[in-house]
Amino acid sequence: MSGVNKVILVGHLGKDPEIRHLEGGTAIAKISVATSEPYKKDGVKVDHTEWHNVILWRTLAENAEKVLRKGALVYVEGKIRSRSWEDKDKNKRWTTEIIADNFTILGSPKRDDNGVLENGSSENGKTAEPIGVEHAEEVEQPTDGLPF
């Protein structure tokens, strides 16, 4: 039996997506998603915020570039990947990322004069379907070792 590597995040984007294109034209996007977990410390409610580096490939990256903006509330599904690389000083570096399979915009803090969210979703801030769904079985993930 094989294992399960599944991640679900609901959080806010810390900045607009960073988009790059590899030599063959393949799009790759990086987003930072903040999740918060409340707890009590000395009887006072405190939020612990965790930042997640999320990588989106191909069509998913192109869709992210079009619709995601800093502050948007997003639902992301994917898998955890760890990788290493050498920096310019030949030091070995490690990172852990979420490789996204799909995302859905749940809301945005900004609305235009008509009350419509800038991301184009409906008045209540929900989108009807996931955007840019790609499945790992159908998409070969490049392993070029880019330290984005």
Image (spheres, rainbow, N blue to C red):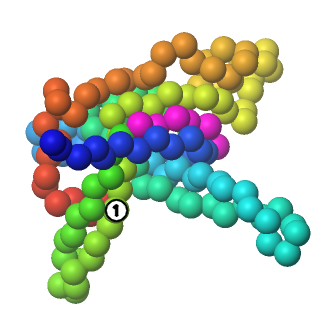
Q: Position of residue 37 (x, y in %)?
A: 66, 56
> Can residue 148 be found in the magenta stretch?
no
Span colored in magenta: 71-77
Q: Against 135, is 46 above or below?
A: below
Regarding mark 1 in the picture, which secondary structure is present there? Answer: strand
Residue at the disc numbered 1: 96
State whether residue 16 is above or below residue 25.
below
At x 28%, y 27%, the residue is: 134
Q: Position of residue 39 (x, y in %)?
A: 74, 62
* The C terminus, quarter of image: bottom left
The picture places residue 17, in percent across and down from the top left corner, at: 45, 44
Q: Position of residue 75 (x, y in %)?
A: 52, 35
The question of residue 75 being in magenta is answered with yes
Q: For label 1, count other residues whose C-alpha is less than 10 Å away and answer few (under 14), some (14-19) or many (20+).
A: few
Q: Is 98 situated left or right of 136 in this image?
A: right
Quadrant of the image containing the N terminus: top left
Q: Is residue 19 visible?
A: no
- Please determine whether, in this image, residue 65 is positioned above or below residue 146: above
- Residue 81: which quarter of the image? bottom left
